[in-house]
Image: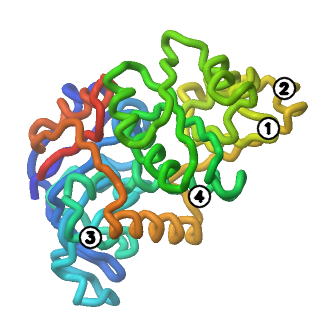
Amino acid sequence: MQAAWYTRNGEAQDVMVVGELPTPTAQAGEVLVRLATSGVNPSDVKSRRARALTDPLIVPHSDGAGVIEAVGAGVNAARVGERVWLWNGQWQRPMGTCAQYIALPQAQAVPLPAHTDMAAGACMGIPGLTAVQAVILAERLAGDLRGQTVLVTGASSAVGHYITQMVTLAGGRAIGTVGSEAKAAHARAAGLQEAIFYKTESVPDRVKTLTQGRGADVIIDMDFSTTAAWASQGALAAHGQVVCYGSNALEVALPFRPWLFQSLGVQFFLVYDLTPAQRQQAVARLQQLLQDQQLQHSIGARFALDQVAQAHRTVEAGQTVGNVVIDM
């Protein structure tokens, strides 16, 4: 099969190789998927640059979509020919979705509705599931989001775009941070009610203005290294909750006194490492949204397999609005 891989860390143009690898076979409990698309996420490029290799080679990317071509023992043969989207394709294993084929446990291949195209399917594993799990946790911590103000950091990002839609569908008032007018327009089209330009204005001050001084009821956050301070400066209402799935810095100073005296809360989660019950709930809710055609999908750039290095550089540049997808 044709695949892309690397055998050492480094810049994409220096370490990515495209060539032939053996086609995997479906083992017991697994399905073999012929991939149509592979989604490229920030975690994929960070891993290529810096995460120590535990195997001789890594076929990157955890997200993808395609058609089941064969099944292993114990898997219903009726699944052959099924359109599917994938999650955790390269989580704690070397063979990801940047290849023509992948074999993985059957639960990680989720039926893709007929009206959802393969490019959108390649955006479900990390962007889609991160967004839906963040909203589920926000509802668990803060209650029904109807009428509540939710600050979405990075509202135009791949994950933020879905979060904004899901908060709006839940009846919440989505406000969010963006880096440009073009990104603001993208987020507004997804339901964002107020855009906050974090590069040129004080986010806590703007949030307080938009909430009559209270702060947001919930912050769904992609960068705790920044949000920890914003929350203590009034961006989060007293007794408010932060749901966080990322941070640009691994060491974060938390201003404890304002967090304590305002009874602020924070819940972290890693989309790769949901409990089985959490995964089942998140997948089911995302599937329902797909079935009901309630989500907008945004593909910002598409590349061929032999352009994988360019695809990685595009994600690293952070200027593309929408998801980056490789067509197989």
Say how the picture is coloured. Answer: rainbow
Task: Please name the amino acid that badge 4 sits on.
Answer: Ile
Report if residue 58 is visible in the image: no
Q: Which residue is at 63% across, 40% downward? A: 149
In percent of the image, x 81 and y 35: which residue is there?
A: 238
Please tell me which residue lies in front, 266 or 155. Answer: 155
Circles 1 and 4 in contact, beta carbons < 8 Å:
no
- Residue furthest to the top in view is 200
Indicate which disc residue 136 carries: 4
State the separation of the CA atoms marked 2 and 4.
26 Å
Residues at marks 2 and 1, CA–CA distance in whole angstroms: 8 Å
Q: Is residue 192 above or below residue 235?
A: below
Residue 270: x and y, percent?
55, 49
Q: Amino acid at mark 2?
A: Pro
Task: Identify the amino acid type marked 1.
Answer: Leu
| Cα separation between marks 1 and 4 | 18 Å
